[in-house]
Image (tube, rainbow, N blue to C red):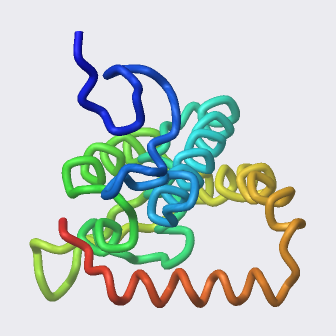
């Protein structure tokens, strides 16, 4: 059988293709690194909120978005979280049923409603914050305050130039 790969490996063989033009080296490709980091943070956060509160990650994200800015609409939650409107709607419905959120209709527009944490929702959020925040403590400890500030600024710049395609 003839091997057409320039590195002498058969298809499916493990190994580096660093000498093949057009191959992205994932360990040095920052979009991939950000994706891996975000996935690790999400998985750890998901484990915490599931174990301590019985919430899934979507429900946690909605809870956190409302805690950050009480009175947000579902549409505003969609814009600040990496979730589509279907996920936000289902998570919101569950949080309302659990008594963690309160929905208040707009006086000006009957199609719009504002979301708030209930006392129970706020208490749960406050209970979860130390462990959720702790997910990045060890990682943050490897960066100086200036490096953390710079990283945050750089990520903010990238978010501005790479538009949300939802």
Residue at position x 87%, y 66% in the image = 142
Where 161 sits versus 44, above or below? below
Q: Is residue 81 left or right of residue 30?
A: left
Identify which residue, 62 or 143, lies in the foreground. 143
In the rendered view, tell whether residue 60 sits above or below residue 14.
below
Residue 80 in percent (x, y) is at: 38, 72
x and y percent of residue 24 in the render? Answer: 40, 55
Specify the quadrant that holds the N terminus. Answer: top left
> Which residue sits at x=15%, y=88%?
108
- Quarter of the figure with residue 146: bottom right
Question: Is residue 69 positioned above or below 18 on the image?
Answer: below
**In-front residue for pair 57/98:** 57
Find residue 137 and report its horizontal and vertical position in percent: 83, 60
Q: Position of residue 18 (x, y in %)?
A: 48, 50
Instruction: Say left or right for 122 vs 92.
Output: right
Q: Nearer the viewer, residue 74 or 150?
A: 150
Q: Is residue 117 left or right of residue 164?
A: right
Give the residue drawn at x 60%, y 45%.
40
Q: Quadrant of residue 47?
A: top right
Q: Residue at x 41, y 60 (%)?
A: 102
């Amino acid at each position: 059988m003839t091997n057409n790969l320039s590195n002498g490996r058969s298809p499916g063989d493990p190994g580096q293709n660093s000498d093949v033009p057009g191959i992205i080296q994932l360990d040095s490709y920052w979009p991939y690194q950000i994706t891996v980091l975000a996935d690790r943070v999400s998985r750890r956060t998901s484990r915490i909120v599931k174990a301590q509160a019985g919430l899934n990650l979507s429900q946690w994200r909605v809870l956190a978005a409302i805690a950050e800015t009480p009175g947000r609409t579902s549409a505003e939650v969609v814009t600040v979280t990496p979730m589509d409107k279907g996920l936000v709607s289902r998570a919101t419905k569950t949080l309302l049923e659990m008594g963690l959120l309160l929905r208040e209709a707009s006086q000006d527009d009957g199609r719009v409603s504002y979301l708030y944490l209930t006392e129970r929702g706020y208490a749960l959020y406050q209970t979860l914050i130390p462990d959720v925040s702790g997910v990045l403590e060890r990682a943050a400890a490897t960066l100086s305050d200036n490096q953390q500030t710079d990283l945050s600024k750089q990520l903010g710049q990238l978010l501005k130039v790479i538009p949300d395609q939802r």
